[in-house]
Image: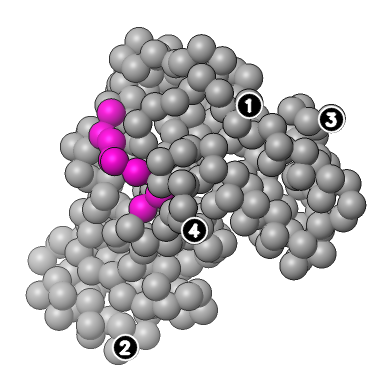
Amino acid sequence: MKQNLKSKIESIINGNIVNTSSLSGGCISDSQLITTGSGKKYFVKVNYRQPDDMFIKEANGLNELKKANAIRIPEVLSAESNFILLEAIESGTRIKNFFEDFGKKFAQMHKFTSYRFGFYENNYIGSTPQINIPQHNEANIWSEFYFNKRILFQYELAVKNGYGDSTLKSLIKKLENKIQEILKGSDEPPCLLHGDLWGGNYIVADNGEACLIDPAVYYGHREADLAMTKLFGGFSSEFYKAYNEFYPFADGYDYRENIYKLYHVMNHLNLFGTGYYNQTISLLKYYVD
């Protein structure tokens, strides 16, 4: 840790840092556990290469998730252009009914709603900008918000990155003409979304319960959050059963699941390259081929 950053953090926590240890798991930033002379521990992520507002947007997302008072969220102590400082949450052993508890609390979080789709600021999905500020009817019509701010944005980015061939272009155009039909019958109030929940974006806290980290927060359709949880292997069946008992899935959820996976697969295409191209095409063809 650079000396000027160390001094800044010490002034924030009002203590002397006597030990730092690197933590695994982050692919964008350097994650460290710091310990003070009094034995207190804190978690810090450091990155001098990313956009200046990435950690600030992450902090705002964590604070928004806290508003639902449904599931544990790390306390934000400070966020600046090159670091975010959080409470250190010790790793624990899963409680016996871990996924049932997780599913119920995640459903409870989705009961926290807003009057419009989107968010008061844009943020990031991974290192990709995520556009949340709605225009025209997007704030009130989910199909317009989702297509324009999620799918179309990723497509335009794919074109810039050299992946926008004639096949992808044709399928996106067909999807635009069918998006309202695909999402028909799923109307719900805009609810608070983690935005990027997969197995790497929660931790088992010291009390054995789930704690959410690394969000890409906005207010949208809860099915978008649920679909993301299934993209990389999914959570246990107990998670979804408990969720459904607390907040039942709407009819047609299974059919709509792939449309929400599409956003994240296209984002991976833009972040990591052509290895995600065929999956992108396959998800599009599920609806419009």
The tag on residue 182 is 1
Residue type, mark 1 in image: Ile
Q: For marks 4 and 1, give the CA distance.
A: 22 Å
Label 4 element class: loop
Q: Is residue 113 magenta?
A: yes
Give coordinates of residue 214: x percent, y percent: 41, 52
Residue at (28% x, 36% y) in the render: 113
Q: For marks 1 and 2, give the CA distance.
A: 54 Å
Location of mark 3 (residue): 289
Q: Does residue 239 sit above or below 179 in this rendering? A: above
Q: For marks 3 and 1, give the CA distance.
A: 13 Å
Residue 43 appearing in the image:
no
Residue lying at the far right in this picture: please name it. 166
243 to the left or right of 164: left
Residue type, mark 4 in image: Ile
Location of mark 2 (residue): 3
Q: Nearer the viewer, mark 4 or mark 1?
A: 1
Location of mark 4 (residue): 131
Instruction: Name the quadrant of the N terminus.
Output: bottom left
Classed neighbour count for the residue bearing mark 3: other residues with Cα under 10 Å, few (<14), some (14–19), many (≥20): few
Q: For marks 4 and 3, give the CA distance.
A: 28 Å
Q: For marks 2 and 3, give the CA distance.
A: 57 Å
Question: Is there a contact, CB below 8 Å, between mark 4 and mark 3?
Answer: no
Label 3 element class: loop
Q: Is residue 66 magenta?
A: no
Classed neighbour count for the residue bearing mark 2: other residues with Cα under 10 Å, few (<14), some (14–19), many (≥20): few
